[in-house]
Image: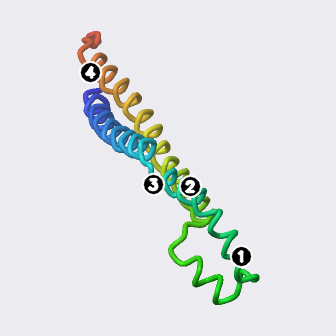
Amino acid sequence: MKIVGILGILAFLLGGLIFLIGLIVCINTYTSDYASSTCEQAARDREKFGEAKALCGSVTSDCYKQATIGLTSQADCDYKTEYMQKQMLMGIVPAVIGGIVAFVGLLMGVGGFFFARRKKPAVAS
């Protein structure tokens, strides 16, 4: 049973590390303004896109492309928002799996060493 305890401690340490890494990714993603700043800029540039379309007529013309160089579109906002959602998912999944592994490892470690200490009854021959 000591081997179960040792494996449990290793699982607890590995699961705890994975949990912490996932938690750090989640916190960094949640506090980041990567997507929100792009969406704010896209909202400010929306009017300029309308002006460029009115001036040039077609959105496929060279005039429109020249007028909108450097502006942030709604597609950029959508792309970065989707990217951040995927990144949050990439933080949540390891955090949950690491938490489960750490909890099971803790139970294995405590149980393995607890049952290893019990004296086995002597068998009369």
Mark 4 or mark 1, which has the lower sequence index? 1
Q: How many marks?
A: 4
Marks 4 and 2 close (CB-CB < 8 Å): no
The kind of residue on which mark 3 rests is Tyr
Q: Earlier in the sequence, mark 2 or mark 3?
A: 3
**Image quarter hosting the C terminus:** top left
* Side (left or right) of 74 relative to 32: right
Mark 2 element type: helix
Question: Residue at point 28% right, 36% down?
Answer: 13
In the rendered image, the vertical position of residue 55 relative to residue 115, given as above or below:
below
Q: What amino acid is labelled 4 in the image?
A: Phe
> In this orientation, does residue 1 appear?
yes
Residue on which the image places disc 3: 34
Image spot of residue 69 (x, y percent) = 54, 78
Question: For the residues marked 2 and 3, what is the alpha-carbon distance in whole angstroms?
Answer: 9 Å
Q: Nearer the viewer, residue 23 or 119?
A: 23
Q: Which mark is residue 39?
A: 2
Q: CA distance from mark 4 to mark 3?
A: 48 Å
Q: Nearer the viewer, mark 4 or mark 1?
A: 1
Which residue is label 1 attached to?
Answer: 53
List x then y, in percent, for residue 65: 61, 83
| In this picture, residue 66 sits left or right of residue 17 | right
Name the kind of residue labelled 2 in the image. Answer: Cys
> Given the current orientation, which residue lies at the most extreme bottom position?
62
Helix, strand or loop at label 3? It is: helix
